[in-house]
Image (cartoon, rainbow, N blue to C red):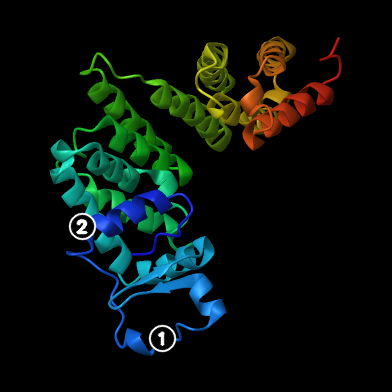
Amino acid sequence: MADGVDVGKATCRRARSIWCSDVRFSIRNVSRAPRGRRSFTEILDVGRSDIVSRSPLFASLALRTFWDSGVVSDLLAAILERALQLRPDGQIYRSIARDLMRFSMLVPIVPLQEREAHLVSYYERIKNFEGCARNPFFWLQYAIARISIDDYPLAEQYLDTAYALASRFTWFDTYQLDNTKARLLLQRTIHDRPPIADAFSDFVKASQIINTQMRERRHGYYPYRVATLYGRFWDAIASKWPDEQRSIILGAVKAVQRLLQGVDRHIVAHPDVVRCSEEISRILFSDKGALR
């Protein structure tokens, strides 16, 4: 199994050691492989019955290539199902299961062509697995996948499902759900262009979530990533609003600007924080009198 995929490297390494007796990326006549070639061995680690990628780029391309044949999706689903069954046996199995539900792991290995269909097909395939159907983390990831393909009605439905399931656990921290909710509200409004009253209401809800998470200072760069959407929201919608609504939007933008001034040192140079700062500054400079 290829362990060079950037976001899934740790998962695939663990999975290979655990599952090699059950599933394996087999290559016939591997003994003929040119092991002595420096360029070849830098990319592939050739064993007697398997080949493991050393290169993240090569692994990603290979997995995308094999996805259409069903090999990759079959393998991931099989590993996930087995890991879910073994969750009581240790944290390593729970980590593997979470990684194989995680949207950010799938993105680098799903083919660019028909990406939407591949993502939906995978999540539909695993949604009834024991450990997925009642798992708020799974429904969060499926909601994120739906947002990525602009399917906002189902994204909202799946996010509501995640909230409902999470409410059963007193210990569950909903910050990821809240962050995704803010993103959903902003992206949906930008995409659908609803009436002013609806768009304004959604923006206020999203900005409240974002400001709360920024003030709590324990959610890293995630609220700043979502606040970057203020730029698109302003360009597409709010810049054309009457002065009263526009001034409230600009007030929210200025609030983010103030919070950016106190951002934690360890994330100040993170790309999402930098992009957020750039978008906030651009909005303010684009509106006459916004800096007065």
Compare residues 278 and 31 and report the one nearer the observer: 31
Compare residues 141 and 241 and report the one nearer the observer: 141
Depth check, mark 2 against mark 1: the one in front is: 1
- Residue 98: x and y, percent? 30, 41
Mark 1: give few (<14), some (14-19) or many (20+) Cα within 10 Å: some
Please tell me in which quadrant of the rendered image residue 240 appears.
Answer: top right
Q: Amino acid at mark 2?
A: Ala
Left or right, residue 252 beside residue 151: right
Question: Does residue 113 appear in this view?
Answer: no
Reading the image, the residue beneath label 2 is: 78
Secondary structure type for disc 2 = helix
User: In the picture shown, does residue 157 fall above or below 168?
Assistant: below
Please tell me in which quadrant of the rendered image residue 5 appears.
Answer: bottom left
Secondary structure type for disc 1 = loop
Question: Does residue 65 appear in this view?
Answer: yes
Quadrant for the N terminus in the image: bottom left
For the residues labelled 2 and 1, the Cα–Cα distance comes to: 28 Å
**CB atoms of marks 2 and 1 within 8 Å:** no
Q: Amino acid at mark 1?
A: Ala
**Point 45% across, 40% down: residue:** 147
Left or right, residue 113 beside residue 195: left
Left or right, residue 19 beside residue 222: left
**Point 50% across, 61% down: residue:** 56
**Point 57% across, 14% down: residue:** 211
Mark 2: give few (<14), some (14-19) or many (20+) Cα within 10 Å: some
Residue 33 is marked as 1
- Residue 125: x and y, percent? 23, 53
User: Quick one: label 2 or label 1, which is nearer the N terminus?
Assistant: 1
Please tell me in which quadrant of the rendered image residue 95 appears.
Answer: top left
